[in-house]
Each structure stands twice: as structure tokens, then as C-alpha cells.
Image (tube, coloured by chain):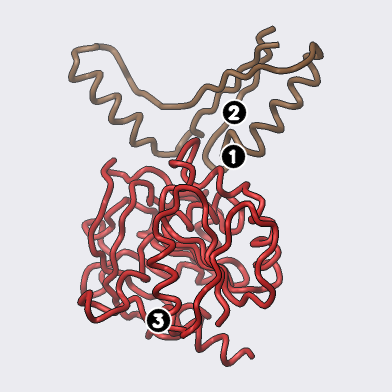
Chain colours: A brown, B red
């Protein structure tokens, strides 16, 4: 099964990298960008076919390692 | 003082740290590899030095914080054992949950490698008895992710309990945004755990301990720990 964990910064946490990207887009003439926040995507291959079990496993992975929940939120999805 | 320096792949300041510990305490520290599961018997002080453990992959310190040796470090700290994390070591202690908060990318996005001034907020801790409260010391920093942040409640608790031990300051001890090199909240450079036995700090006191280098402002931290342990024994 293919799965994806998306980690994003919590609202209110300053994201200097996102700000730099935002500035670069503006200087490239890409118009209409209001703001940029940088995050991470993990594509994970799961053994077995039990989607509920996979979701629990992904949550465990995110809580234990993939996200630092002090500053980050995460979303897990089993893509199938 | 029996010190143990924990070594992870990608750490590069362990020899500076070991040299300083030997110089100030007179005892060679044990170098403990991350895959070990126990600290040497009778360890008084655990030091997690600076560097780039696991190449800073995922988040600075994130992978090292989950290494086998960290359970032993956690147990040492839980018993009240002195634990010091410098630079990447501070990031690792935060990721391991031994200290609150997190070190983010420097506000100006640049790696900073220079001497900074630190205001020592308290002298009544195991780490700072070699200094006077309010004293300003000059020590180097070398980091890209030293911008300390935690949620508002945590910051209020750290401040209320006097757990901010070092702040970036001007040479005369003024807390000023111009001297807060990495943008850390409240100019925080180092914090204590709730039981005052774990210290995490971004600057490198171990690099300013010998007159041949020029400055010895970092020496007080190590001499203070030696004195604290001698008194406790």
C-alpha cells in the first residue's frame, strides 16, 4: 500500500525559509503569491492491505519521528 | 568529575569538548558511542557535543534523539544527573524531550560563526556557580539553526521559573535585537530543565577555556560543574 505523510508548520510559527521562497517568487515575477509556508512530504510503502492498521502505523511514525509536534502538524493518508 | 561525551555519527565537536573536560576537571572523559545502551558506571556528567549528527537530516537532532544511548541519558537526567547539550547537543536534548521547545532556522537564514556575548542570568545553578549573576561572557557560536522557540505558555513558565540561563546580549549586558544573532525568542541562548540539572545552550563555552586561544570566558561553566559535584559528593 502506498501512503503519504504531510508535515506542515503550525500557524503562528515563523517560517524563514517560506519567507525567503516567497521573496524569490516575487523577484521572479510570479505574481499573486500572498504567502508561502514550507513543509515536508514522506511517501511511504506499507506492508499488508489493512488500511486502518496502516493509518495507525503512520500516526505512530509521525508522532515518534516524522513531525516535531511542538512546531509541526501532520496529515496521514493511505493512497491505496 | 566523571564525564561521558556521547558521540553520534556526524558530531564534530567531541574532541574540543573532551579536551576541555580533561583540562578543567583533570579527568579524561569517556567517549560513548550512540549505539551503546549504558553509560559508564558512576558517570556524573553527560555531555552531548556539537556537530551535525546524521547530517541534520529530517530535523537537526531528530534522529540522534532516538538513538539507543538516549534511554540511558534520559535515565541519568531523571535521577538528577548533570546533563549538558551544546549546539547540536541542545537540539538533540530538545528533540529527545529532555528540554522544552525547538531550535529553528536562524531568522536571517544564515549560518552564524562568530563570537557572541552572553548575559549569565543566574549564578545559583550547577552550571553557573563559576560566574556572577548578570555577568557578560564572550564565547563563540557556530550554527544555522539556533533560533529558539516554544509555545507562549512554555516561554512564560521558563521565564517565571528562572530557567533562561543565558541570553544573547551586547558587550555591556543589554538585551537588544541587534545582538540577538539568530532571532531567538527573548534572546534565549540557553535553558535549564525543571530540576535545573539539564542545560542546553547554542554557544560553545568549551572553545574559550585556554589562554593560548585568547579568551577563557567558557572555563567558568566547566569549573562550576566540577565545584558543584565536589560539594555534592
Q: Secondary structure at mark 3?
A: helix
Mark 1 neighbour class, 10 Å CA radius: few under 14, some 14 to 19, many 20 or more? some
Q: Nearer the viewer, residue B150 or B83?
A: B83
On screen, residue B142 above or below A80: below
Identify the image quadrant of the C terminus of chain B: bottom right
Please name the residue that numbered disc 3 is placed on: B23
Residue B82 is situated, as x and y percent measured from the top left of the image, at 58, 73
Residue drawn where x is 41% and y is 85% of the image:
B130
Marks 2 and 1 sit apart, C-alpha to C-alpha, by 8 Å
Marks 1 and 3 sit apart, C-alpha to C-alpha, by 40 Å
Q: Secondary structure at mark 1?
A: loop
Q: Is residue B58 visible?
A: yes
Please name the residue that numbered disc 2 is placed on: A74
Contact between marks 2 and 1 (CB within 8 A): the answer is yes
Identify the image quadrant of the N terminus of chain B: bottom right
Q: Could you tell me which chain the residue with mark 3 belongs to? A: B
Residue B4 is situated, as x and y percent measured from the top left of the image, at 56, 69
**Relative side of B53 to A75, left or right:** left
Please name the residue that numbered disc 1 is placed on: A69
Q: Is residue B152 visible?
A: no
Residue drawn where x is 64% and y is 73% of the image:
B81
Amino acid at each position: 500500500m502506498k501512503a503519504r505523510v504531510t508535515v506542515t508548520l503550525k500557524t503562528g510559527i515563523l517560517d524563514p525559509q517560506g519567507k525567503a521562497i516567497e521573496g524569490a517568487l516575487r523577484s521572479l515575477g510570479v505574481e499573486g503569491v500572498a504567502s508561502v509556508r514550507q513543509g515536508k512530504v514522506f511517501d511511504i510503502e506499507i506492508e499488508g492491505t489493512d488500511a486502518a492498521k496502516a493509518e495507525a502505523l503512520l500516526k505512530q511514525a509521525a508522532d515518534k519521528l516524522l513531525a516535531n509536534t511542538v512546531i509541526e502538524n501532520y496529515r496521514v493518508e493511505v493512497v491505496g | 568529575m566523571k564525564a561521558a561525551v556521547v558521540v553520534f555519527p556526524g558530531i564534530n565537536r567531541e574532541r574540543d569538548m573532551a579536551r576541555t573536560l580533561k583540562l578543567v576537571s583533570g579527568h579524561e572523559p569517556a567517549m560513548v558511542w550512540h549505539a551503546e545502551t549504558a553509560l559508564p558506571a558512576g558517570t556524573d556528567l553527560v555531555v552531548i557535543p556539537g556537530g551535525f549528527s546524521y547530517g541534520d537530516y529530517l530535523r537537526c537532532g531528530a534522529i540522534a534523539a532516538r538513538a539507543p544511548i538516549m534511554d540511558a541519558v534520559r535515565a541519568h537526567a531523571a535521577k538528577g544527573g548533570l546533563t549538558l547539550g551544546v549546539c547540536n547537543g541542545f537540539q538533540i536534548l530538545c528533540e529527545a524531550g529532555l528540554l522544552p521547545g525547538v531550535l529553528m532556522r536562524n531568522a536571517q537564514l544564515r549560518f552564524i560563526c562568530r563570537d557572541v556575548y552572553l548575559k549569565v542570568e543566574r549564578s545559583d545553578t550547577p552550571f553557573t556557580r563559576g560566574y556572577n549573576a548578570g555577568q557578560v561572557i564572550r564565547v563563540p557560536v557556530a550554527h544555522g539553526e539556533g533560533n529558539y522557540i516554544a509555545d507562549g505558555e512554555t516561554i512564560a513558565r521558563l521565564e517565571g521559573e528562572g530557567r533562561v540561563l543565558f541570553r544573547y546580549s551586547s558587550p555591556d549586558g543589554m538585551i537588544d535585537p541587534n545582538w540577538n544573532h539568530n532571532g531567538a525568542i527573548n534572546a534565549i541562548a540557553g535553558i535549564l530543565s525543571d530540576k535545573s540539572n539539564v542545560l542546553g545552550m547554542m554557544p560553545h563555552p568549551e572553545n574559550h577555556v585556554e589562554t593560548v586561544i585568547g579568551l577563557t570566558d567558557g572555563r567558568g561553566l566547566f569549573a562550576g560543574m566540577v565545584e558543584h559535584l565536589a560539594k555534592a559528593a
